Each structure stands twice: as structure tokens, then as C-alpha cells.
């Protein structure tokens, strides 16, 4: 696969949330506003890329019997970096999603890519795989939070269109499940219909 | 040709004796059992109540046709299931609800709860109740602004009034009794006849009860769900020192116990499972009524127990006749 194909693979064919259906916990917990979804998406994009790069660079010196603890150490190291950066640069958003940035450590998607891709591939493809998976995750969070914030709060990025809440359930956890499920069904339907991955939402 | 060939023995799997009853016949009969309560809601809430009923039923039928068209299934509006869902959903709405609420509720009930799970017979949750839960959470204010019954069909004055359960929860029973001149008999009578504010179909306990008894008589439902459900509510009310008659007649207990918890699709199929289902519905209802944030708990109780219906069926299955019990691990 070329580098470009690796990125596209992460966004469409193996989209973390809509296709692999992993790391669903943050996709519901933080997506009640576009801003939160976007900030967490950026954080995951960064961690995913750096973890892939680091694991790929270390792949020949990691003893395969203890590879999972080593991956976890690498992941938690980069998560700590992101945690401190977000706390310093975006303190408002950090107050709401700080907890979720810390539990990026436990995201299945990140460990999965370290195991199935970065530990078996060279430096450059691993980086592009990390970028693709990270962008795919971020795009998914932004799409989900777009609908949830628009319907649940009547606003986008904190900018209110109406002064009432059109469909309150959408910013509650139950609405998050509805949004993820319906979007997942929609993308699968688009794919079946068009015979290829949708290029836009 | 020999005699034997003419009377060929056909060996097929059970069931061998087929009933005349069809799904659509059951659906329309259940709808007919709700007719008295339907007429009463028109009488108590006037034209506004009728409009809500018609809009809900029409949008349920429209979403049924739409959902079936989308997935290229035959459109089966005449089986009455969408009509019944619409009727039950409307019974759970206040009469002065803005009309977009029943339309969204119908979409959630029919398209999401029923057809996304595979259509009639495949849904896990009662469609009308999910539709109601969805709109209750989305528009809590509109859904809890109850209209007091109008004095006559042509009356145009709309007075909003809290439901008896709401008053009892927030201000206590004493305050509620004041509304009825301090007489418990007067309160019970109003609850029984439906001279109270509330959702369209839950006001007159008596008329719902008549419909429910009709279904019991026709053997469309059995006592195994409604009786344990209602009995549990009464027993819990007695044990906790609340007024059992009030909890029996107020809110949606009769409607829920006879028409919603008895749904063939979303409830257990085994008798023992149904009894446990009913008891648990009653316990959850009283837990929510007495300790929860909402004044009425019938809807959430039934929805929660819908999740457990398959489990109840599996755990409480009776041993098949002649089956040998698996040997316990030898000691």
C-alpha cells in the first residue's frame, strides 16, 4: 500500500468507530459538543502517530514476550505528553474532557495499531498508518458531535442558533448511542449502495 | 388406485392444529379493546385530544409504510400493528402536546425501535414505550404540562394542572386530597372515572380495566403478567405505608399492565417467566414512583424488564416431559 492508501484505509475501510467499532466509549462520552470531539480527535491523532512511530522504531529490540507492557509504556508516555499540552493550551476544553485524554492510554484502537501494524512495519508506513487511523477517528468524532450538538443544543462549536434545546436526548448518553448507531448504519448503507467508501459525509 | 394412496399420511412438524386467529385479528381486537378509553379521552379532553390521537396514528402508519418501502418489504398497514402502536403512543401523551412531539415519537417507535430491529416480531422493546421515553427525555416540559379535563366537548378553556401522582410526589397526599375536598372516596372516584389530568389514555382506570378484562376473556392475554404486576404494586404500597388504592388507580398502571407489559413480542413467552416479569415490573414501578426522579414509573419499568424477557424465558423454562436431568458433577 502506498502512503496515501494507508491514510485512506484509516479513514474509510478501517475507520475505528464506524467500521471496526472499537473505542466506542469516548465516541459517546465526549461527542456532546463539536469542540470536545475535535480536541479529543486531535489528541488521539497525535498519540496514535507518535506511538506507531516509536513502536516501529523499537520493533527490533522489543522482546516479543513482553511486547504488550512495552507498548503500554510507550502509549502512556505519549499520553502524558498530550495531557500536559492540552491542559496548558486548551484549559477550558481540558476541564470537560481531561479525564478522557488520560484514558487514551486504554483505547483499544491505539494498542491494536501498535500490535497489528507498527510492530511489523517500517518507520514511514507506520507513521502514515497512525495519521490515517488518527484522522479517521477524529473525523468520526466530529461527525457524531456535529449532529449531537446541532440537535441536542441547537448550536455548533458553542455558537447557538436557537435559544432552546431542539432534541435534548441527543446530548445525553442515550442519544450518543442513537447517533453512533444511525451513522454507522448510514455509512454501511452508502457503501453498499455506491459499491465504494463514501468520500464525504 | 388403492385406498391407501388416496389417504396419504402427511408427516409434518408441529403445530398441527392451527387457530383461526391471525396477527392482524389480534391487533385489531386489542385496538377495539382500547375503544372505550379512546372515546373517553375524546370526551374528557375535547377536540385537542382527538387531534393528538389522529396525528399520532396517522404518522405511525406513514412511518410504517415508509420504513417498509425503504427496505423493499411488502407494506402491511392493514395488519393493525402500526395502528395499535400509534393508539398506545397517543394514550401516553398529554392532550395539549405540540404536534411535532407525536410525529417524532412515531418515527422513533416505528422506524427505529421496530423496523431497524427487523420489523414486527423482532423488536426487543415495546415500540410505543420507546417512542414515549424518547420524547419524554427530549421535551420534558411539554411532556409534563398536563391539561385538566375540559368540562364539555366544545369548551375552549385549557387549564394546565399537575397529575395526581405528581402532586402526591411533590406536595404529599394531604395536598392532593385538598383538591378533592379532603375526601378519599371523591379522589378514588375521579381516578376511576377519569376526571383527572394526565395522559390521554391513562385517566380512566375503569375503562382501561374493561378493555383489559375483555382481552382476558378472549384469551388474547393471560393473567400471568397483569395480575402479578398489579398485585405487586398494591403490596409494595401497603408495606411502605402508602395508599394502595391510589397507586392502583393513578397513572398508567392499568394501561401498562394490561396492554403494554402483555406484548407478545417484547415479553416472556413462558408462564413462569411472565409471572416473574410482572412482579419485577411492579417492584420497579413502585421504586421509581416512591424513590425515583419521575412521578410515574410504569413505562421505564416495562422497558427495563423488556431487556430481561429472553433471559427469563431461558432460565425459567420448564423441563421437557421425559427429558433426563443432566447429572450433577459427582461428589
Image (cartoon, grey):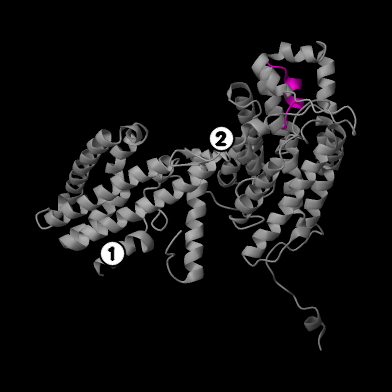
A86 left or right of B57 in image? left
Across and down, in percent, residue B243 comes to 72, 17
Q: Mark 1 points at which residue?
A: A6
Identify the residue at horizontal 71%, vertical 14% (top origin): B173
B267 left or right of B198 in image? left
Across and down, in percent, residue A62 comes to 12, 53
Instruction: Tell me, yes or no, if residue B9 can be seen here.
Output: yes
Residues beneath discs 1 and 2 located on the same chain: yes
Identify the residue at horizontal 70%, vertical 33% (top origin): B228
Instruction: Tell me, yes or no, if residue B320 can be seen here.
Output: no
A94 left or right of B37 in image? left
Asked whether A135 or B299 is in front, the reply is: A135
Figure quadrant of the N terminus of chain A = bottom left
A107 left or right of B133 in image? left
Q: Mark 2 lies on which chain?
A: A
Number of labelled discs?
2
Q: Mark 2 points at which residue?
A: A163
- Label 1 crowd (10 A; few <14 / some 14-19 / many >=20): many
Across and down, in percent, residue B241 comes to 67, 14
Q: What element carries label 1?
A: helix
Note whether A52 is above or below B3 in the view shown: above
Q: Mark 1 lies on which chain?
A: A
Identify the residue at horizontal 72%, vertical 61% (top origin): B15
Q: Which residue lies furthest to the left in this view?
A: A61
Across and down, in percent, residue A25 comes to 40, 43
Q: What stretch is highlighted in magenta?
A: B241-252
Q: Which of marks 1 and 2 is in front?
A: 2
Q: Residue furthest bottom?
A: B1
Which numbered disc flags the more N-terminal residue, 1 or 2? Answer: 1
Amino acid at each position: 500500500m502506498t502512503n496515501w492508501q494507508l491514510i485512506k484505509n484509516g479513514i474509510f475501510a478501517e475507520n475505528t468507530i464506524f467500521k471496526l467499532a472499537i473505542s466506542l466509549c469516548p465516541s459517546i462520552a465526549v461527542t456532546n459538543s463539536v469542540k470536545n470531539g475535535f480536541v479529543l480527535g486531535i489528541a488521539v491523532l497525535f498519540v496514535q502517530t507518535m506511538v506507531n512511530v516509536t513502536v516501529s522504531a523499537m520493533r527490533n529490540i522489543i522482546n516479543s514476550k513482553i511486547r504488550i507492557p512495552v507498548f503500554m509504556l510507550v502509549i502512556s508516555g505519549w499520553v502524558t505528553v498530550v495531557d500536559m499540552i492540552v491542559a496548558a493550551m486548551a484549559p477550558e476544553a481540558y476541564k470537560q474532557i481531561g479525564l478522557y485524554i488520560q484514558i487514551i492510554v486504554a483505547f483499544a484502537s491505539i494498542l491494536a495499531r501498535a500490535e497489528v501494524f507498527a510492530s511489523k512495519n517500517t518507520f514511514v508506513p507506520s507513521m502514515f498508518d497512525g495519521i490515517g487511523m488518527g484522522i479517521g477517528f477524529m473525523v468520526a468524532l466530529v461527525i457524531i458531535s456535529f449532529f449531537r450538538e446541532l440537535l441536542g443544543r441547537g448550536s455548533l462549536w458553542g455558537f447557538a442558533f436557537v435559544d432552546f434545546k431542539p432534541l435534548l436526548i441527543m446530548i445525553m448518553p442515550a442519544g450518543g448511542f442513537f447517533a453512533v448507531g444511525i451513522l454507522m448504519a448510514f455509512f454501511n448503507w452508502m457503501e453498499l449502495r455506491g459499491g465504494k467508501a463514501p468520500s464525504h459525509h | 388406485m388403492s385406498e391407501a394412496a388416496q389417504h396419504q399420511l402427511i408427516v409434518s412438524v408441529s403445530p398441527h392444529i392451527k387457530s383461526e386467529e391471525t396477527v392482524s385479528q389480534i391487533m385489531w381486537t386489542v385496538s377495539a379493546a382500547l375503544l372505550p378509553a379512546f372515546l373517553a379521552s375524546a370526551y374528557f379532553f375535547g377536540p385537542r385530544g382527538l387531534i393528538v390521537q389522529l396525528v399520532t396514528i396517522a404518522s405511525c402508519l406513514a412511518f410504517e409504510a415508509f420504513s417498509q418501502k425503504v427496505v423493499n418489504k411488502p407494506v402491511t398497514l392493514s395488519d393493525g400493528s402500526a395502528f395499535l402502536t400509534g393508539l398506545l403512543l397517543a394514550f401516553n401523551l398529554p392532550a395539549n402536546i405540540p404536534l411535532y412531539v407525536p410525529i417524532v415519537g412515531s418515527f422513533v417507535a416505528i422506524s427505529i425501535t421496530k423496523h431497524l430491529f427487523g420489523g414486527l416480531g423482532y423488536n426487543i422493546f415495546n415500540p410505543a414505550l420507546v417512542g414515549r421515553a424518547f420524547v419524554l427525555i427530549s421535551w420534558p416540559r411539554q411532556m409534563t404540562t398536563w391539561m385538566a379535563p375540559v368540562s364539555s366537548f366544545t369548551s375552549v378553556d385549557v387549564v394546565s394542572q399537575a397529575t395526581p401522582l405528581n402532586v402526591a410526589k411533590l406536595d404529599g397526599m394531604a395536598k392532593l386530597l385538598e383538591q378533592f375536598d379532603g375526601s378519599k372516596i371523591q379522589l378514588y372516584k375521579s381516578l376511576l372515572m377519569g376526571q383527572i389530568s394526565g395522559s390521554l389514555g391513562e385517566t380512566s382506570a375503569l375503562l382501561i380495566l374493561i378493555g383489559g378484562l375483555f382481552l382476558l376473556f378472549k384469551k388474547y392475554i393471560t393473567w400471568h403478567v397483569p395480575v402479578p404486576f398489579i398485585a405487586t404494586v398494591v403490596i409494595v404500597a401497603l408495606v411502605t405505608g402508602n395508599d394502595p388504592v391510589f397507586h392502583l388507580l393513578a397513572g398508567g398502571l392499568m394501561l401498562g399492565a394490561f396492554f403494554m407489559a402483555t406484548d407478545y413480542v417484547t415479553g416472556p413467552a413462558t408462564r413462569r417467566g411472565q409471572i416473574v416479569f410482572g412482579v419485577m415490573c411492579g417492584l420497579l414501578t413502585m421504586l421509581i414512583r416512591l424513590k425515583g426522579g419521575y412521578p410515574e414509573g410504569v413505562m421505564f419499568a416495562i422497558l427495563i424488564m423488556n431487556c430481561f424477557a429472553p433471559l427469563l424465558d431461558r432460565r425459567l423454562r420448564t423441563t421437557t416431559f421425559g427429558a433426563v436431568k443432566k447429572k450433577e458433577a459427582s461428589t
